[in-house]
Image (cartoon, rainbow, N blue to C red):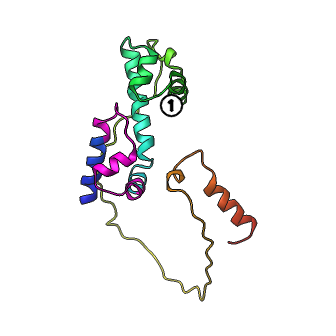
Amino acid sequence: MEWVKLLQTALDYMEAHLLEKISYEDVAREVHMSSYNFHRTFSLMAGMTASEYIRNRRLSLAGQELQMTNIKVIDAAYKYGYETPESFAKAFSRFHGVTPKAAKLRGTRLSLFNALVIKITMEGGKNMDYRIVDTGNMRFAAKVKAFKNETINDGANHEIPDFWTACRKEKIF
């Protein structure tokens, strides 16, 4: 259960520092993990990287603030960690489907990205029918390729699908 406490500490740290310049490396240091292990653990448990989580939370909060207050778009851009209003507008539009200026209009639909909550559930405890089949001798082969840890969960990265496509073309499996 120690990993649950570490993950909760990481989530609490990210939420408390959303308006500051933080990265997943900073969060990893906070929970005394290597950035590699934190990145893998968080990605596995949350289904997204810590960087994606931070970005989505910031954009969600920015949308709420733009719609509920009189904050200027440029001020929101800097407040939520963007270096230029253009980069903020691009990320905001991709996340919410509308421009930051349009988000200021009452009634505009925005995307909400709530903070993660840890819930532990247990499943199983049911009978399962099975059979053991002897399939005889089998041979296995492996093709090894290294991928960058940061890009494994990056939706825009096609290294892994391209690897599998090349394996199929070479008739490896």
The three-letter code of the residue at mark 1 reads Phe
Relative to residue 149, is residue 140 drawn left or right? right
Residue 12, how many percent across, how many down?
27, 42
Q: Is residue 112 visible?
A: no
Name the image quarter holding the C terminus: bottom right
The residue depicted at 43 percent of the width and 35 percent of the height is 56
Is residue 56 depicted above or below 171 in this figure?
Answer: above
Give the residues in magenta: 14-40
Q: Residue at x 37, y 39 (%)?
A: 22
Residue 58 is left or right of residue 133, and the answer is left
Tell me if residue 51 comes above or below residue 152 in the rendering.
Answer: above
Relative image position of residue 35 (x, y in whole percent): 39, 54
96 lies above or below 117: above
Crowd tier of the residue under label 1, counting other residues whose Cα lies within 10 Å: few below 14, some 14–19, many 20 or above: some
Secondary element at tag 1: helix
Task: Find disc 1 in the rendering and name its residue.
Answer: 95
The residue furthest bottom is 136
Q: At x 38% / y 27%, what residue is drawn?
A: 61
Quadrant position of the N terminus in the picture: bottom left
x, y percentage for residue 15? 30, 37
- Where residue 119 sits: x, y (%)? 29, 49
| Vertical comparison of 134 with 97: above or below | below
Residue 151 is inside the magenta segment: no
Viewer-side residue, 86 vs 140: 86
